Amino acid sequence: MNAKEPGDLKPAIGLYSTTAIVIGAVIGSGIFVSPAGMARSSSSGLALLGVWIVAGALTFIGALTQCELCSSMPRTGGLYIYLKEAFGESVGFFYGWANFMIAGSGAIAAISFIFAGYFSEFFPLWRAPPELQRWAITIPYLGRLFPLADLGEKMVAGAIVIGLTWINTRGVRLGAGLQSISTTCKVLALLGIVGAAFFATGGSSHHIWASRAGTTTLTTWQFLGLAVTALGGAFWSYDGWGNVTYVAGEVKRPERTVPLALFLGTAIVILIYLAVNWAYLYVFPVEELGKVSGDRVASALMNQAFGPWGVWAVALIVLVSTFDTTNSSILTNPRVYFAMAKENLFPAMAGGVHPKYGTPHVALWFQCAWTLVLLFTSSFELITSMYVWVNWLFYLLMALAVFICRRRGYARAFTIKGYPYVPAAFALFTCAYLVMTLLEDIHQFQIGESPMIKSLMGLTLVLLGSPVYLFMIYRRRFPEKAVASPTR
């Protein structure tokens, strides 16, 4: 590793906290609701578990692929660094741009909003009059925004975002320590739900093997739609595993610790997800699982086990889980913008390091400000639905980056087993998933089920960063017109 320079972030995070970041970034709210929607696209309980296994296996392969890249380039910025090194700074920039404008900030807004929704079950929140909630801003070809709807929830979510941002500016040890505590509580709570299913509901393992009644032969489009829907739900729940590489520069012995944390964290998440879904299917046949009110499967399970007290317990668990995931995203994502600022691909002030706490405090507040814009305009609901396809496009480039770095002879502390077959299999499946999703999006647009081709619109949002990239290149070429980057 290169010696640290003034203004660099300092290593302070150990293996437990690093693993907690992996788990915390992945397990958010999806596992509590996604299985219901996936069940409506599955022919049996076994098929539903199969989707989780396939998605988990691909996630694990993706994590192993990133392990090798991180061991070669254990620097702050993660996938931004790997894509820049393999494909050039333009690709790295677009990844960072998409992360700031859409994926990272949008995910923080979405998860914090879910936190606020469950918070309202304990403390009623203020709501604007109906006529104000219905007031909308129309964006051509995208949809309508309702900035005054759910204003009470947005205020709570905004307070969480601001509060956690402040905590994470006070030192990476503090943010990582909070992550370790909240992730541990979340994992124990999920294991409690599994235990409740098997010991307090009187369910049956027969549900797992039973097929949906009245299953018929599907057309090609029907099968494609169901496959994309089911896999999309699983991939959404599994996403976030690579965020830990963003903080590699602040991890002790990152070339070994980060790959090990990715390996352990991803494996733990897969096992937890399979156990929780097994518990759901133990209580509900797949057909009933798809009909659970509001898709709140965990609440329905705990209600059957303990009545209303069980429902309240799940609401509390979701609060802990979404709080944990929000903190993980706030902690990790600004490191990408920090790394970009150091290379003049982001406003230079975002490359500043707090003189006392050693954190990228300006990048943290940049992220906070944009997240609040997405939150209070409700635009995160639009952009997060469009970004999944683009996210997997970057995962494809990540897999290809392994081949490029191997060819260039990058040193590495971790070697992915089964090379070149394992990363090649990941790349091929990712290509298939991208094509399937694009075809389904086009089909849904043509039959009027969707107002846009979401995958292509997501790509368009990313490419809208082109003028920004050209401007940053211009400023770098003429440094006398740029603002000097702070050294501390």
Image: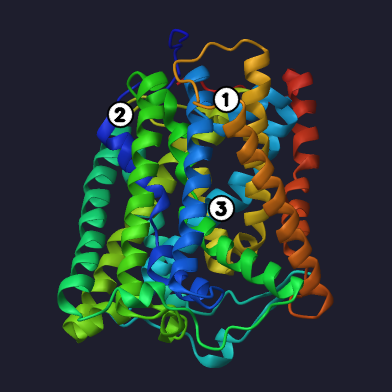
Question: Percent position (x, y) of residue 111?
Answer: 44, 61
Task: Answer above or below: position of 224 versus 304.
Answer: above
Q: Amino acid at mark 2?
A: Ile
- Mark linked to residue 13: 2
On the image, which quarter does residue 468 sit in?
Answer: top right
Front label number (3 vs 1): 1
Q: Nearer the viewer, residue 201 or 67?
A: 201
**The C terminus lies in which quarter of the figure?**
top left
Q: Earlier in the sequence, mark 3 or mark 2?
A: 2
- Mark linked to residue 370: 3
Q: Nearer the viewer, residue 350 or 441?
A: 441
Q: Residue at x 23, y 67 (%)?
A: 193
Task: Answer above or below: position of 126 versus 230.
Answer: below
Residue 154 appears left or right of 265: right
User: On the image, numbered disc 1 is attached to which residue?
Assistant: 419
Label 2 crowd bin: few (<14), some (14–19), many (20+), radius 10 Å: many
Question: Percent position (x, y) of residue 345?
Answer: 67, 30
